[in-house]
Amino acid sequence: MTSTSANDPLALIAELTHRCPLHCVYCSNPLALTQRTTELSTADWSRVFQEAAALGVLQADFTGGEPLTRPDILDLIRAARAAGLYVNLITSGMPLDESRLEALTQAGLDHFQLSFQGAREETAQEISGTKAHAQKLRVLEWLKHHRLAVTLNFVIHRRNLDQLPEMLALAESSSATRVEFAHVQYYGWAFANRDSLLPTREQLMQSVDFFKKSQERLTGKIRIEYVVPDYYAKYPKPCMGGWGRKLMLITPNGDALPCHAARVIPHLSFENVKDHSLQEIWESSEAFQKFRGESWMQDPCKTCDRRTQDFGGCRCQAFLLAADAAATDPVCSLAPQRPKVDAILATVAQASACAPTNISTESKPAWLYRSNPA
Amino acid sequence: MSIDLNAHPRLSPGCRMNEKTQQPRTLLMPERALRLHGPSLEIVERCDGKRSVQQIIAELQELYSKAEPTKVEQDILGYLALLQKERALDFEP
């Protein structure tokens, strides 16, 4: 294999645990979750943060599962700050009370990102399989009393797209300076539930129109970011900013992955931070080298002008939809496998044409809920 | 959106510089980072909630005395507007 030199990674995604009080039907965790007994210790993570900072990483994203289920969360925040990293907490807001929130702030947390499953209790409960919405509203109130950056993250899809104005109103009544409207991306549990989540093209266009108008209205007050479902895109997303270019994900047991979903790619093995330094893994492990640069590309990517912008799209999606991880991302309009994506979208359009137009009266799908690790 | 010359810009919660010992100096923000050097660093270091926009302009006009003062002012206002759009600044009265 041609060795391709590595840039400095910018962010470390730390999946601290796969335990979670929620069971979201679109969870990005893999279907095979990491067991609690194999989770990295506080000392292991602290060393990883030091090595990450030395490698040039600026930010640590604490995620999971639910990072607040780690009893050592305060020590982990302190350790990441001591290493010189900026600390993001990506959380469902539970388990949390006001004094623990104060302690998180004191420990040096920089940014609190609270996820929502909808603007209404009943939708949130259907999607997360848990009663968590009222707790999230309490957390929003507590956050008003802390000097902490707050982002609200709404994961959106066909079942809650009709609630966008309510979602934004919730954000405007909070202390959030950022809102993310993230259309579901189809990996992990979301891939399993895809046919119940994918919006129609018309619904998507309406949502984008709403985001753009809201961005304009709220400039300087709230920064609005949105992610569209790439099945509808003309060109693929530059997934993870390019394979092994900017981001590194560490699973709860210490495996280093180029992205959340990389385990779906067959015959790809991952090094563990207990056996190798982060620098060795980043610069020379097979997993990070595999799709770094351009030498792995096939036609049409290989000669495409866009290859330096989108890096051929997403490797995991190429495998999931085209059974070849080195294929052009099938969502690309230039991809030989694009007809597969069009067929999926046609099914969505057809189902929607037969179904009632009011989302909330649509019958509840047979969801596959995310489970919990042993 | 125009910038009020009498307002006191201050980095928003969750927006901070990395440590003085870390190079290059970088403004860290939720989900993003801006590398700062020269004038951009001089501007951000003065967004402390104590100096007004007018004061920041005066200080930088002195610091960059060889540059055209109106050009310095325009550059500063442009940069503050960019940071405001990034939602990195609070403007206090």
Image: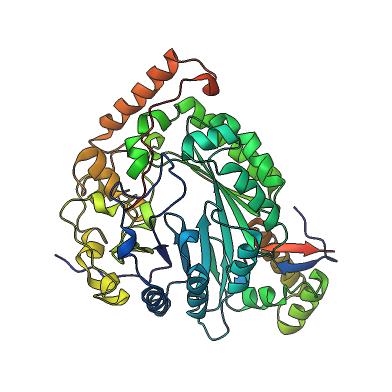
| Horizontal and vertical percent position of residue A253 | 31, 64
Apparent side of residue A167 relative to residue B56 in the rendered image (left or right): left
Q: Nearer the viewer, residue B86 or A304?
A: B86
* Quadrant (top left, top right, bottom left, bottom right) of the N terminus of chain A: bottom left
Residue A221 vs B70, above or below: the answer is above
Apparent side of residue A107 relative to residue A55 in the rendered image (left or right): right
Q: Nearer the viewer, residue A351 or B77?
A: A351
The type of colouring in the image is rainbow
Q: Quadrant of residue A337 in the image?
A: top left
Does the image show residue A187? Answer: no
Residue A235 vs B20, above or below: the answer is above
Residue A333 vs A67, above or below: the answer is above
Q: Quadrant of residue A283 in the image?
A: bottom left
| Horizontal and vertical percent position of residue A78 | 52, 76
| Horizontal and vertical percent position of residue A343 | 30, 25
Q: Nearer the viewer, residue A72 or A61?
A: A72
Residue A187 vs A346, above or below: the answer is below
| Horizontal and vertical percent position of residue A116 | 55, 44
Residue occupying image coordinates x 49% and y 25%? A202
